Image (cartoon, helix red, strand yellow):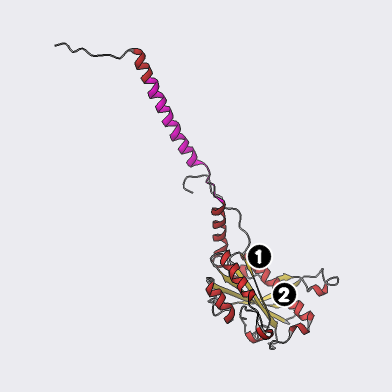
Amino acid sequence: MLIHERRRPPAVLAVVAVVVLLAGTAGFLVCAGVVATQLLPRRFTSAQQASISNWEVAKRWRDLPAGEIFADPVGYQPPAVLDGTGSSLTLSADRVGIANEASCRSAVDAAAAAVLARDGCEAVLRATYVDTTDSYVATVGVAAFADGAQAAAANRQINAVRPRGGGLPPGVLPVSFAGTPAANFTAGSRQLTASSAEGSYVVMYAIGYSDGRPRVPIGDDSYAEAEMTSMGTGVAGAVASVLGKAPAPPHCPGTPGC
C-alpha cells in the first residue's frame, strides 16, 4: 500500500525557519541582557548607603584600639579670653589612663543613666586627661548607640535637664588613677559637665581641679571656667572626630553577588 506524504511548500518552510531563527535570537538577547546586568557593578540606593555608613560608624567603638579613640596627647585652643594674646598658642592635655568598658548605668550619674538606658545605650568608654600644668583633670566618656538617631535623642534629653539649685547637668562620672594628678578626681569634685552627639555616640566630659576640691561657684573665676571649658571641649572634640568621622561612600566591586 502506498502512503502519500503531504509535503509543505518551500515558501512555507522558509517562513517557519525565519520565525524559529528570530525566536532563538530574541531568547539569546534576553539571556545576554540578564548576564550583562548581573555583571554590572551593584549600585546602592541612598537609603542603603546611609545604612551601611551608619553601621560602619556604630561599630568603631568595638573595632578601634582604645589608644586610637583616646589619643595622647590632645591639643586644644586656649580660652577665648586670651584672644589677641594667646590665639597663636595650642595647649595640650595628656592622657593619664583609660578605664575598662563600663555599663551605661555605672559610668554616668543617675540623671544621665536614666536617659541613656531609655534610648538604647550599649556601653560607655572613658579616659582621663590632665593639662600640662597638672591643674585641671577631665574624664571623657563615650556612650555608644546602635545609630545616630538614638544618640541624638539621648543627647537632646540630657541637655534638656535643668539642674536645681545650680547643680551640674547630667554627665559622665570621673575615673581617677592612683599615682597621677587625677588621683583625687571624684564625682563631688566635678566643676563642669557637658555632652554632645556625634554619629552613633554621645560624647561627654566632666572636668575639675586636680587637687580634688569640691565643686565651687566656678562662675566666680571666669578664666578658670573658660580654660576648663576649652580643655573639656577640646578633648571631647578630638574623641568625637575619631568615632564620628564620616566613612567613605560605600561601593560594591563589579562582581556578581558582591
**Residue type (three-letter) at the residue carrying disc 2:** Met
Which residue is painted at 59% across and 78% down in the image? 112
Q: Which of 207 and 167 is in front in this view?
A: 167
Secondary structure state at the residue bearing disc 2: helix
Compared across the picture, whether 75 is left or right of 40 comes to: right
**Stretch in magenta:** 17-45
In this view of the protein, which residue sits in the foreground, 150 or 41? 150
Q: In the image, what residue type sits under mark 1?
A: Ser
The reply to whether residue 239 is in sight is yes
Residue that extends furthest to the right in the rendered view of this protein: 84
The reply to whether residue 72 is visible in this rendering is no
Q: Does the magenta stretch include residue 41?
A: yes
The first of marks 2 and 1 along the sequence is 2
Answer left or right for 240 relative to 100.
right
Is residue 220 shown above or below 253? below
Question: In the rendered image of this protein, does residue 254 appear above or below residue 28?
Answer: below
- Quickly name the residue at label 2: 231
Q: How many residues crowd around disc 1 within 10 Å: few (fewer than 14), some, or many (20 or more)?
A: few
**How many numbered marks are there?**
2
The CA span between labels 2 and 1 is 15 Å
- SS class of the residue under badge 1? helix
Within-10-Å neighbours for mark 2: few <14, some 14–19, many 20+? many
Instruction: Provide residue 16's location: percent of width, then percent of height.
Output: 36, 20
- The image shows residue 139 at horizontal and vertical percentages of 64, 78
Tell me residue 137's x, y (percent). 69, 80
Q: Residue 241 carries which label?
A: 1
Where residue 201 sits, quadrant-wise, is bottom right
Q: Main secondary structure of the magenta part?
A: helix
